[in-house]
Amino acid sequence: MASMGSGYAVEPLPPVSMSTPTEAERAAAPVLNAILTASAPVCTGQDNAERELVIQALERCLREFVAQVGVARGIYASKEAARASGGNVYISGSYRLGVSGPGADVDAICVTPRFVTSNDFFEGMTAQLRRIPGISKVRPIPQAAVPMTEVELDGIEVDLLLCRLERPSVPPGREFDILDDLVLKGADLSSVRSLNGPRTTELLVKLVPNYGTFRVLLRATRLWCKRRGLYSNKLGFLGGVNLAILCVFICQRYPERGPVGSLFLFFYELERWRWPDPVFVTRPYLRVDMTTPVEVWDPASNPRLLREQMPIITPAYPCASSTYSVVGSTLHIMRQEFRVSRHLRPAPVLPPRPASPTHSRRAPCRTHHRSAAAGRSPASCGTRPRPPTLRPGQSSSGPMTSSSAVTATSSSTPGAPT
């Protein structure tokens, strides 16, 4: 469970099977790890240490800049007093999830108090960045859909996004909890979108039951997507956040399975999933005590969302579809690829059928009322008008993988479906 502040919390969805890895899966695990080490290496300890130094330098620069703006606005009498206004840098994406490769950039979000404007950031912060020793590139892009500044420091590329909160200060470190939904209150559209990057990443880490399995599965599926030409959210396929949510989804449904079995189940579940039924990793909810410029994903109140082909819903409030660019043709291609990968070799086990469905695929959007003392539970706020579909817990055979080295190891596993 992850607390979202003010009595709100999100919980992972319950599993559909507690089956453990088979002997064949355990034997295939070193083969899968060898493939990933050779074809999808991750940052070493030295690489991570260098990135941490860069992030710390950028955070020091941000706090100095925020203090300067506070003094220039007349809010603080001195720079020493202005340093209390803070300013933090949060990380999202593949680096935070531990699957970033050597040479990959870092997605960073600069969170500032309300007196720092967008113009301040793209002018004053740019000048401040250029004074950092070792900086080789500072490229502000204020007109982008999500405004950012591209930075290269000590050979490491960082995308800096701005999140301006309606708060007088942003305390450093753990004193400020970005998972508290109320930090978004009063924020503009760009700030909500920017901050929901690290909020979503942190929630995925908290909602996955086995982080080690998740990390290997995410590396394997990212490699598979790139090899099959499917790694592009902009072109209507799957991007990093989409794959991360799907991998958490598989790990939640089969929490005791190892990386090899989870990889089989990834293809099996997605090939059989009744799209456009949405994929969730936690129940979405509405808050009655605040609003944001980003609407909550709820087809019951917004029928336009029924047109989406492959909704994969982010867990952070306000929940949204991360695959709105998927169209019918790209979904058809992905389903074909899932099917091919599934049928290369029988799955090692037959997942047991759960006694009852774990959740409805019909947009279970809840409205939270602060009535814990009264013992009332959140009520449903609408359903997705779709025809009856296969329930998420129903499964009759295992998935396939496209790695011949792994499938050859697990082909003789007892219990394979006939």
Image: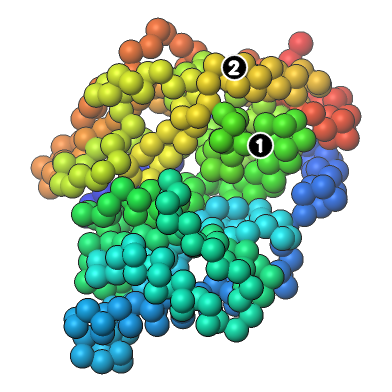
Q: Where is 53 relative to 296, above or below?
A: below
Q: Quadrant of residue 350?
A: top right
45 displayed left or right of 98:
right
Q: Where is 272 relative to 223, above or below?
A: above
Q: Position of residue 400 (x, y in %)?
A: 74, 24
Q: Quadrant of residue 167?
A: bottom left
Residues at marks 1 and 2 touching, judged by CB atoms closer than 8 Å: no
Secondary element at image label 1? loop
For disc 1, the neighbor class at 10 Å (few under 14, some 14 to 19, many from 20) is: many
Q: Position of residue 176 (x, y in %)?
A: 33, 68
Q: Where is 199 relative to 18, above or below?
A: below
276 displayed left or right of 371:
right
Q: Residue at x 34, y 77 (%)?
A: 66
First of labels 1, 2 by sequence position: 1
Q: Which residue is tagged 2?
A: 329
Front-most of residues 359 and 78: 78
Q: Amino acid at mark 1?
A: Tyr
Q: Residue at x 83, y 29 (%)?
A: 407
Q: Quadrant of residue 397?
A: top right
Front-most of residues 317 and 327: 327
Q: Position of residue 105 (x, y in %)?
A: 63, 59
Residue 192 visible, this orientation: yes
Query: Label 1, label 2: how many angstroms apart (C-alpha)?
Result: 15 Å
Q: Amino acid at mark 2?
A: Ser
Of all residues shown, which one is farthest toward the top? Answer: 387
Q: Residue at x 55, y 81 (%)?
A: 132
Q: Residue at x 59, y 31 (%)?
A: 235
Front-most of residues 61 and 359: 61
Could you tell me which quadrant the C terminus lies in?
A: top right
